[in-house]
Image (cartoon, grey):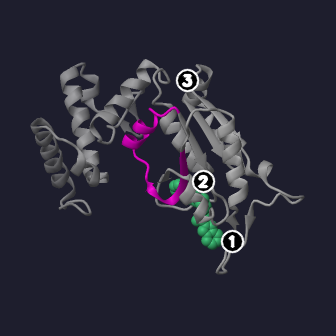
Amino acid sequence: MRFDILSLFPDFVAQIAGHGVVGRAGERGLLSIHGWNPRDWAEGNYRRVDDRPFGGGPGMVMLIEPLQATLAAMRAADPAPAHVIYLSPQGRPLTQARARELAALPRIALLCGRYEGVDERLLQAEVDEELSIGDYVLSGGELAAAVLIDAVARLQDGALNDAESAVQDSFEGDGLLDCPHYTRPVEHALGKVPAVLLSGNHAEIAHWRRQQSLGRTWLRRPDLLDEAALSKADRKLLEAFRAQWLAAVGEPPDGDA
Ligand code: 9WO
């Protein structure tokens, strides 16, 4: 799969996205990342890529022409059709489900805005999808693009090692939060490892982990619980977790119905 980054700082995105799992996927030939700087396609001695907003106000807006020229150069470099994504707080939320769909595409172009954003006409004409990685404002789309590349690249077949894939399946399969993890030492000033994990009883361990996942999702992200398809056994595990938690704390967590 091919990623094209359109940005005033394309190397920055390629750098942060080029480590760890994603870097290894690149070495394995599973993906490539290409940077395109609109400054290189801007006209005149000053190579302007931005101008003042009509209607007044602070900040600058990215010009149509340099971005169109950059997109044209990007398309001319490879015949594969590119799905063009603009990263902004106004986009639909990026989810694991959407990342999985994007991972099946042959080519994704990531348009990274700076300043106050991009002329709306360019977005209307050239962008297939606008995505947000969360409800906060960054200084530009670059970090959001790196996040998207990381989320999508690790889903390429062969990107993850076996151990990493197992972890991924347990999160993605059910949409619940992960259970807590422990390693050596068994006893530490900060606390003991839960005895069940030392029991060697794999069925009990699996039950405990499932219950922790359900309980943490209930406490921290009850919105995810609404979407999760819970089995009868899950409901019993969660009910027991709730009863224990309420007995210990005495009142339900914020926002619990
Ligand atoms: C800058 C600015 C300056 C003066 C007055 C108002 C202003 N608004 C902005 C602004 O929101 N700039 C954005 C920066 C324009 C699009 C690219 N930028 C961006 C993307 N910030 N945060 C994101 C982002 C992308 C995906 N998910 C979360 C946040």
Span shown in magenta = 84-106
Q: Position of residue 219 (x, y in %)?
A: 27, 52
**Is the CB–ligand 1 distance for label 2 below 8 Å?**
yes
Observer-nearest residue: 1 or 70? 70
Instruction: Identify the mark nearer the N-term, 1 or 3.
Output: 3
Q: Distance between the residues labelled 1 and 3?
A: 39 Å
Q: How crowded is mark 1: few (under 14 residues within 10 Å), some or many (20 or more)?
A: few
Residue at the extreme right of the image, as rendered: 45
Any mark on residue 141, and which?
2
Q: What residue type is labelled 2?
A: Gly
Q: How crowded is mark 2: few (under 14 residues within 10 Å), some or many (20 or more)?
A: many
Q: How far apart are marks 2 and 3 (CA)?
A: 24 Å
What is the secondary structure assignment of the residue under circle 2? Answer: loop
Q: On the image, numbered disc 1 is attached to which residue?
A: 59
Q: Distance between the residues labelled 1 and 2?
A: 16 Å
Q: Which amino acid does label 1 sit on?
A: Gly
Residue 103 on the magenta span: yes
Any mark on residue 30, and which?
3
Residue in view at x 18 percent, y 23 percent: 203
Q: In this view, does 145 lie to the left or right of 95?
A: right
